[in-house]
Image (cartoon, helix red, strand yellow):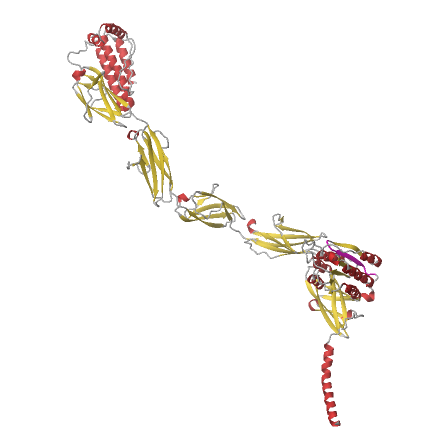
Amino acid sequence: MGGVLKKILLALLVVIIGLMPVALVMTQEQPGLNIEISGINPTELPTVNTTVVVLDNLSQPVTGLTEENFQIVGELQDIAQIISVTSLSDENLPISVVLAIDVSSSMSDTPINRAREAARTFVETIGPDDPVAIVTFSNTAQVIQEFTSDKDVLLQVIDGIQAGGETQLYAGALLAAQTAGDAPTPRRAVILLSDGAQYSTSQPASPRDAGLTEAIARGVPFYTVALGFGTDRTYLTEIAEGTNAIFRESPRAEELPTIYGELASRLRTQYEIVIDADIPADGTVYGLELQVTTDAGSSTNRADLRAPVPVPIVRIGEIASPLEVVTTVETTIIADDGVQQAEFLLDDTIMQDVTVTQAEEVYSFTVNPLTLTPGIHTLTVNAVDENGDVGTASSDFEVSALPSVVTLEPDIPGDALTEPLTINVNVSGQTLATEISYSVDGEQAVTVDGDGITLDPRTLAPGPHRLAISVTNEGGVTNTSEYNFIAAEIPPTFVVRGLEDGQVVDETTEVLVDILTSQSPEIELSFVLNGTAVEDQGRGPGALILQPMDLPPGRNTLAVSASNGLGQSAEQDITFEVPALAPEVSISGLNAGDTLEDNATIVIEGDSQTPITTVTYQVDDTILTTPEDDPLTLTLDIMEIGPGPHILTVEVANSGGQSSTANVAFMVAEGPSLTATALAPTATPTETLTPTITNTPSPTFTPTVDFTATAVQEAALLQATRDIESTADAVIAQETSAAEALVATGEAVSTLDSRATSNASSQGTRDAQATERVASTATAAVLNTATSEAQNVDQATATAAARVEA
């Protein structure tokens, strides 16, 4: 048994000895120290005040450490160095603390009582020279006690705290950070207590991250305490860890005094490490790693060191160069004292019309190259903080020469165009436009003037089309904008000239048709007069002659139609009036002034608007038999008529109740018994013979003689006497004197004058010439009957001939 026991003991000893190195190694690897960085204050850069707590493996503060126990490692080890290490408890250095207490309605009764008790515990535990300030927050945040080390005053203020209102957590944190930043000592901290969260239905008095941002900038650590389970745990954790402090939870209000006592002891057992850091004051965040080493081992911890920004720092985002499109530029402005004003300048001119939007410390605005001239431009941003410090930054960029921007007013509709559309072309951009032109479907370009562009679907083929607008600007850039539109099917349009509704057509009228618009160049025009198509008159398309003599009296209708090659047509009806017209009469075979020596056959032709009803013939006052052949012919028997001057009258009447008269003056040659001596005048006229010629259509023809002479007066007196005794025919037959011959001759002249004038009115120049011949013949007859001694008669006759010619 003894040998076996020895063997067992020996084996156990070997095992123990073999395990001893392992146990020793495990003991050495167990940490004996823990360093916590509880605050970094870089506001006096390059000097950085840092507070740390060193705890042993039982979480008890380690005292008696010096500068030799600490060193900087990591990112800043080559650009920062430790200047001094001081124990706050050993040197009795004061530390300023802000107690921020939630006093909303949810803190009523027990919570607010325990909060007051915890605050009293903290004041009584803190050092005698440690200043304390008190901030409360509910509907608003307020400082109810400035920094003081008078504990009696502090305790009195704490006892007077009451609860009520909603929680403005963000505003309370911001005010606490600002108050701590103004503490009378470089060592400062905030202890914030809340049992709830930001009141969600109200507009926050401060942004969510405002308190954390302020605390980091001022180097203020936030120790946060959450009371109960309704707190915004995330927010309280973020603000504590963001400032290198700690977050504590207190499910029950009774735990608050203990937590506040521990925090007071912790703050009084810190080490202050003063560091000289060669870093710019530009807001850059660095990783500060501190290592502590003692006989118990070593420990390293890291915290963020954000460089302060005593003067606003402006960082302009990248701007593409050359700039061709509208660009949003983001500018970051960092200012620990808050941005009071941000000013944006472009080429030294304040951008009054720029719209700046701010998200935290980033300002966004747009740069539109179309509003800038081509070339180099400079953007400058000035920022002013609440202390009046000014930070500035500038950035140069190039703007390309860009095409103009074209807009149409109004826009081209998507539906088919049925009416002409006038469009105004608006051009904007960097530079003014030097030339604007347009074309439709690639046709020759047309310059755009002040009247804009007119798209007339009536002149375009039905269907889709493309409008192209080209603009050249002062920058030398030409751009073309294209727009699609549709032309509807539209009949041609035209205008009728020479005839209009209600017009009275009483003479030859020419009607012309002008085509205004057509979607096809092939046009066919047609006329329908009173329901009957009008045959081509040989005047070309669009021309028509209306002869009123060929139209019935009264209302007439002309329908004008235009058709194009697309089968589209348009029609216009014109109603006009035609008056009842007298027939036109022409006589051939006998000319005015002819002297008949033999019987003559004449032909009478009548042109009438309505059927001719009657034709009457007479020579002087004798009505002849009406011939019935067609064309109408008439034989003049000179033996029946007798020698001397005569007038043939033809009167034509139609069914329209209108009539016309044609007169022809002629002579019948004298027979052998008629001599010049027998016709010698017995009286001498004293005044000029004045014949009158008329051609007014009338049922009867009455020649008129108007003259005055002494011989005529005597003959007229004699004739009047004989009229009493006998008929006028007997008087004329017995009177053979020269005066009576002169009267007869004068009467013929007067009759010829009247008939010639009528023919001149109805038949024109030809009849006027005939009148002259008749007048000349009559004058010759007067001269042949006058004697050489009748000089007055010669003078009177010459005067009459001159007037007839006139």
Which quadrant: the C terminus?
Answer: top left
Q: Is residue 737 magenta-colored?
A: no
Quarter-of-image position of residue 281: bottom right
Which quadrant: the N terminus?
Answer: bottom right
Number of on-image labels: 0
- x 32%, y 39%: residue: 526
Percent across and percent down for residue 692 are 29, 16
Percent across and percent down for residue 349 are 62, 48
Judged from this view, the residue extending furthest toward the left is 672
Q: Considering depth in this image, is 482 or 249 the residue closer to the camera?
A: 249
Does the rendering let one see residue 136? Answer: yes
Relative to 721, 494 lies left or right: right
Percent across and percent down for residue 547 are 30, 31
Query: Above or below — where is 289 with respect to 734?
Result: below
Q: Considering depth in this image, is 556 or 755 the residue closer to the camera?
A: 556
- x 18%, y 25%: residue: 629
Q: Considering depth in this image, is 416 or 511 the residue closer to the camera?
A: 416
Does the rendering let one see residue 310? Answer: no
Quarter-of-image position of residue 158: bottom right
Q: Is residue 133 magenta-colored?
A: yes
Q: Considering depth in this image, is 320 or 57 the residue closer to the camera?
A: 57
Quarter-of-image position of residue 719: top left
Percent across and percent down for residue 284 are 68, 61
Please provide the residue range marked out in magenta: 129-139
Query: Above or below — where is 158 with respect to 497?
Result: below
